[in-house]
Image: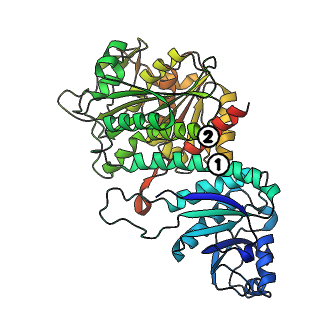
Amino acid sequence: MRLEFSTKVSLPDREKADCIAVAVFEGERLSASAAALDRASGGQIRALLRSRDLEGKPGTTRLLYRVPGVTAERVVLVGMGKEKQVGAKEYRDGVRAAVSAIRETGAAQACLYVTEVAVADRDGAWKARHLAVVADETLYRFDQMKSDKADARPLAQIALGVASRREMRPVTLGLDAGRAVASGVALARDLGNLPGNICTPEYLAEKALQLGKQFRLAVEVLERADMKRLGMGSLLSVAKGSRQPPKFIVLRYGGAGKGARPIVLVGKGITFDSGGISLKPGAEMDEMKFDMCGAASVLGTLRAAAEMKLKLNLVGLIPATENMPGGAASKPGDIVKSMSGQTIEILNTDAEGRLILCDALTYAGRFEPQLVIDVATLTGACVIALGHVCSGLFANRDALARELLAAGEDAWDRAWQLPLWPDYREQLKSNFADLANIGGRPAGSVTAACFLSSFSGKYPWAHLDIAGTAWKSGKEKGATGRPVPLLASFLMRRAKR
């Protein structure tokens, strides 16, 4: 069941929701709504802060029952830190903590009065958008494969309480955008979390077709014979070891009319990556079902853009296949010919993502794009360089890189730009082909991006390496849906230009 959002003009002390949430700050400071509850309760909120039972630190909460003078049965006080220093992180942490606390009460519907909190350089629409994305992310559960479903009575409705009708419009607009982005993130997470025996290339194609029917996207699925006819020898070399037939999925969204050149999004769709003949170690190999998270994020982003009815033309390209060590699989030392005509010496079959993306990047040129962005769980080296906080960004135009970095900051789905200098191309030289598919251990994420840049043609191009951000390991193992928020923010900003 999807989480429902709404906005309403509402006085916090008279709100009849199962639970309400208001913000407090360090130094015994109250938000406007918390002050209204304090007045209605005869000073109970301030007394609580004076007792140091809640100090207002970011992400801390306190649940109160049956506060005198307050209609709602439950009140969640959520700390936002220092009142004059609330930034994006503090605000999002506060929303996440409030929603988590409300969920634990078993409340079915709640009203949050947090968009009134001043966040540095952010308006009401931004706060509402992020509230929706963070709330949906917090309540997300993947139990499709379980016989016993979680949350028998989940939090199903969240209202954003505002003080006046004047505040309604920006909050409502932001909430609409947030709802769309949250739906795109949830789709990407669902696809990423499915096991490889279910989420096959054919399954991805079926999901794309369903998305097309739901949002009136034009969808075309190219089969192995089509790829062979197009000369996609690099992509097909990866598919050789698998019994699952590869698919090349093309989605088109026309929000700007026929004359506008499209933005092309390319997503790596390796639905399971064994490493091929260059077999991966067995430990944590189950996580290689997440190797199609680039494809999932492209589908999620297109869903969000279509739901928001952005005035842009978009094309989504998803090369999808498994990478398996069958008897027909590619071997180290094999040489294949890409769609671009360039030959590639495969020195490591576990560097397969770039082999399917390079043909997709060549194919992207036929749309005469204004720009192309590829998204891929491409290199473990990027995880070593940047950890799990931000995605790696490479671009052949600095202006495009700056746009994506700004979109990442806006979405709090951040990226960091890494170099794409010609010096690194020296590592990709081959004695037997035009280039090799790996450049050795040094700067592995950079040489992978340099490899892709050899196929990006003359159009503006950017590459997002999401190997460190697309999923989490350990106790919280699962897909994150990143970088759907970053890409959605980028497209929203482009649509306003």
Q: Which residue is mark 2?
A: 308
Give 84 or 20, whichever is nearer the viewer: 20
Tell me the residue at 32%/56% (across/down): 145
Tell me the residue at 37%/19% (across/down): 344
Please tell me whether mark 2 sits on a helix, a strand or a loop.
Answer: helix
Task: Identify whether 265 is placed above or below 119.
Answer: above
* Labelled pair 1, 2 in contact (Cβ < 8 Å): yes
Q: Position of residue 222 (x, y in %)?
A: 36, 23
Quadrant in the picture for residue 485: top right
Give 231 or 488, whichever is nearer the viewer: 488
Q: Position of residue 481 (x, y in %)?
A: 50, 48
Tell me the residue at 31%/31% (across/down): 349
Please tell me whether mark 1 sits on a helix, a strand or a loop.
Answer: helix
Task: State the separation of the CA atoms marked 1 and 2.
Answer: 8 Å
Query: Reading the chain from its start, which is encountered first: label 1 or label 2?
Result: 1
Q: Position of residue 423 (x, y in %)?
A: 56, 23
Tag on residue 176? 1
Task: Identify whether 1 is placed above or below 349.
Answer: below
Task: Identify whether 26 is placed above or below 215.
Answer: below
- What residue type is disc 2 on? Met
Other residues around mark 2 within 10 Å, as few (<14) / some (14–19) / many (≥20): some
- What residue type is disc 1 on? Asp
User: Position of 360 compared to 247: left or right?
Assistant: right
Count of numbered tags: 2
Other residues around mark 1 within 10 Å, as few (<14) / some (14–19) / many (≥20): many
